[in-house]
Image: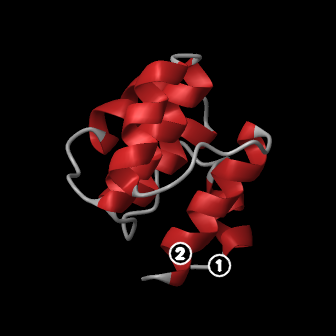
Amino acid sequence: MTYEAFRQSLGEQNPPASLTPLLMAMWYEGRGDWHSAHEIAQDVHSRDGSWIHAYLHRKEGDLGNAGYWYNRAGRSTPTDHLEEEWESIVRELLGSQ
C-alpha cells in the first residue's frame, strides 16, 4: 500500500483488512480515535510499537510518558509538528511491509 492510498483509506468507515496492527493504530489515530490507537499500540512490544506509543502520549500532552516511550523506541523526542511525525511513522511502517 502506498502512503497516498493509506491517507485515502482514512475516509472509509473501516480500516483496510491488510493493515498490520501498528498501521491499524496509526489509521485510527489518523481518524482522531486516540483511544483505539493507544489500545493497539500498547500491546505491540517492539521498538515501532514504542515509537507509536510515544507519539500518542506526545499528542496527548503527556511529555514525561512520551519521553519514556521514545527512549524505549531508541529515538529522540522529535521537535517537528505532530502531523509530520504521524506521516514519518506511517511512511516508515509502509516501507517495511
Q: Name the residue under label 2.
A: 94
Quarter of the figure with the C terminus: bottom left
What residue lies at 33% left-to-right and 48% top-to-bottom? 72
Pair 2/1: label in front: 2
Q: What residue type is labelled 2?
A: Leu
CB-based contact (under 8 Å), mark 2 and mark 1: yes
Relative horizontal placement of residue 50, taking residue 3 as reference (left or right)? left
Q: Nearer the viewer, residue 14 or 37?
A: 37
Residue 74 visible from this viewpoint: yes
What is the spatial separation of the Cα atoms under label 2 and label 1, in whole angstroms? 7 Å
Q: Name the residue under label 1.
A: 2
The spot of residue 6 in percent (x, y) is 62, 64
The spot of residue 63 in percent (x, y) is 54, 22
Q: Nearer the viewer, residue 14 or 28?
A: 28
Category of crowding for the residue at label 1, using alpha-carbon neighbours closer than 10 angstroms: few (below 14), some (14–19), many (at least 20)? few
What is the tally of numbered marks visible in this picture? 2
Q: Which amino acid does label 1 sit on?
A: Thr
Quarter of the figure with the N terminus: bottom right
The spot of residue 80 in percent (x, y) is 79, 45
The spot of residue 41 in percent (x, y) is 33, 43
- Judging from the image, what secondary structure is the residue with disc 1 in? loop
